[in-house]
Amino acid sequence: MPTPTDAKPAMPVIEFRDVEKQFDTKTVLKELNFTIERGERVTLIGPSGSGKTTILRLVMTLEGLTDGYIYIDGAPLVYEQRDGKRVPVSKRQQKLLTTRIGMVFQQFNLFPNMTVLENIIEAPIHVLGINKRDAIDRAHQLLEKVGLPDKTDAHPTALSGGQQQRVAIARALAMDPEILLLDEVTSALDPEVVVDVLQVLRDVAATTDVTMLIVTHEMSFARDVSHRVMMLDGGKIIESADPETIFTNPAKERTKKFLAAVLRDA
Ligand SMILES: Nc1ncnc2c1ncn2[C@@H]1O[C@H](COP(=O)(O)OP(=O)(O)OP(=O)(O)O)[C@@H](O)[C@H]1O
């Protein structure tokens, strides 16, 4: 039996180390450091334009990294230190790591020329190499889970925004991701369907141990599903604590002011 002292220290599943991100001459993130542990669900809040979406896009390698390092399970995602130099990691390594990450976008980003089923099975077959029969079986299970078992053959344009977003969640889950990034997934939806989409995500949170990094303006959802809330301002994490501390019992005057400003922005 291994004793606690034999156990390897758990590696954070996501680590940002001295990350800097500039767009042209504008610095959005600077000396940004944080870690997220395996199975943690973390909500990122901050004023409009503070760089929340940029952080998710950096994890997904949809944006270039100006400086610093990002690690997934301890492996460098974009750059690594070699012989004291900062050098890009191989495309192969990057692809291996990003395959373990799923992202759901504000604007769904489904392939419009494919049916719902084709949208869901495309990456499992072509990226993971899963056989078509298994991919289809899994897609049916996922469509059941998101409440759309009868939409297999529909095209995205024939679906409502809420339905498209539930398909996008099923598509992300079909890759069996270790990390799920949620970027304001209800912001483009009519208010009456927001609750359905959030219910699907609450269910994912309750029934899987996927690590989640969430950007949302839905504070009650954030409070219910997150283990931790990180506040981003001026390119850095200025506070990080459990939702109870942040939302209900903020210790610092600064947190209260910050929350009031963020909620005003929402
Ligand atoms: N591709 C880009 N080119 C230039 N500037 C960009 C680009 N993407 C983002 N920015 C800028 O970077 C800053 C951070 O943007 P980001 O979308 O990450 O903020 P956010 O915190 O998610 O904001 P919001 O809550 O309004 O969605 C903004 O000032 C934005 O204008």
Image (cartoon, helix red, strand yellow):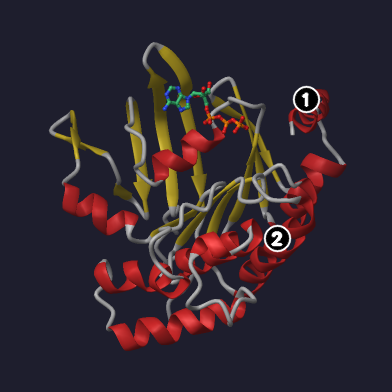
State the mark number for residue 261: 1
Kind of element beneath mark 1: helix
State the quadrant of the C terminus.
Answer: top right
Residue 169 point in image, percent of width and height = 54, 63
Is the N terminus in the top left, top right, bottom left or bottom right quadrant?
Answer: bottom left
Q: With 145 as the anchor, is 19 left or right in this view?
A: left
- Callout count: 2
User: Disc 2 designates what residue?
Assistant: 198
Residue drawn at point x = 70 percent, y = 59 percent = 225
Label 2 neighbourhood size at 10 Å, few (<14), some (14-19), many (20+)?
some
Q: Residue at x 55, y 26 (%)?
A: 236
Tell me the amino acid under the disc marked 2: Leu
| Labels 1 and 2: the sequence-earlier one | 2
Residue 239 quadrant: top right
Residue located farthest toward the right when viewing the structure as drawn: 248
**Is disc 2 placed on a helix, strand or loop?**
helix
Q: Position of residue 128 (x, y in %)?
A: 28, 71
Q: Are marks 1 and 2 in contact (CB under 8 Å)?
A: no
Which amino acid type is shown beneath numbered disc 1? Ala
Q: Is residue 217 left or right of residue 28?
A: right
Image location of residue 82, percent across then percent down: 15, 36
Residue closer to the observer: 102 or 109: 109
- For label 1, count other residues whose C-alpha is less than 10 Å away and answer few (under 14), some (14-19) or many (20+): some
Which circle marks residue 184 in the picture? none
Q: Can residue 140 be seen in this snapshot?
A: yes
Q: CA distance from mark 1 to mark 2?
A: 24 Å
Residue at 77 percent across and 40 percent down: it is: 246
* Above or below, 71 relative to 200: above
The residue under the point 37% across, 55% down is 73
Is the C-beta of the residue carrying label 2 under 8 Å from the nearest atom of ligand 1? Answer: no
Of badges 1 and 2, nearer the viewer stands 2
